[in-house]
Image (tube, helix red, strand yellow):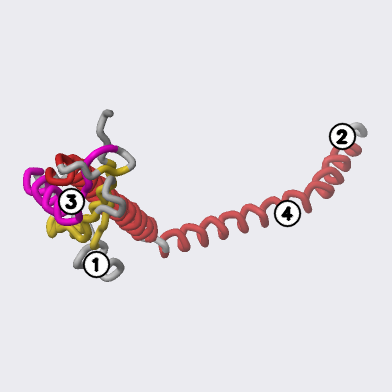
Amino acid sequence: MNRAGVPGARRARQAAGRWRPVVEHLRREGRRSRLMAARMRRAAAAEDGQTLLLGIGLIAVVLALILALASASAVYLDLKTLTSLADSAAAAAADAVDEDSYFGGTTTDTGPGVLSAAGVRAAAAADLADQPVDLSGVRIAEAYSPDGATAVVTLTAHSQPPFLPWGVIPASGFTITATGTARATTGM
């Protein structure tokens, strides 16, 4: 036997002995990681379909928000339409100065003529009848002149939004109110 070969074999056995615990540790860790991977696959298989439910829930929430926003916008647009009608009726009523008071010499701070409550109501009703009304239940709640020179017209209407979330908001809709004010002046 070669003398050089004996110490080399001993060194190889010593090196193998030193690395054996490391190799065993890596084998154990490999088994653990395979077991963990198998457990994770089983857990993932048990949760199949959960993403679908989450997606459906998210779509339902987004759709509810869109419909609520559309309903709120519809009520807002109805209110703007009613406000425009009230302003138009008040302007028409301010132009309807009672002829007897105008030509009879009755004056106010702004000039000749006095607005009467009956004249304001009649002029507002005539103007409202001439307007194209897209709202349901539009009526004159108040029409008066507090000082003989200012016409105040208050209108009410019924707003029925197209997408009411049933059970949360009253299904009958909303009653909306708008007031328009106009002042009668004459150039002197």
Front-lying residue, 145 or 11: 145
Name the mark on residue 25. Answer: 4
Q: Sequence order check: which comes first, mark 2 or mark 3?
A: 2
Say which amino acid is labelled 4. Answer: His
Residue to which mark 1 is pinned: 166
Q: Sequence order check: which comes first, mark 2 or mark 4?
A: 2
Q: CA distance from mark 1 to mark 2?
A: 93 Å
For label 4, the crowd category at 10 Å Cα-Cα, with few meaning under 14, some 14 to 19 and many 20 or more, is few
Q: Nearer the viewer, mark 3 or mark 1?
A: 3
Q: CA distance from mark 2 to mark 3?
A: 125 Å
Say which amino acid is labelled 2. Answer: Gly
Mark 3: secondary structure: helix
Image quadrant where one finds the N terminus:
top right
Q: Position of residue 66 (x, y in %)?
A: 30, 50
Residue at 13% across, 59% down: 137
Mark 2: secondary structure: helix
Question: Do tag 2 and tag 3 residues touch (Cβ < 8 Å)?
Answer: no
Segment tinted magenta in the rendering: 111-131
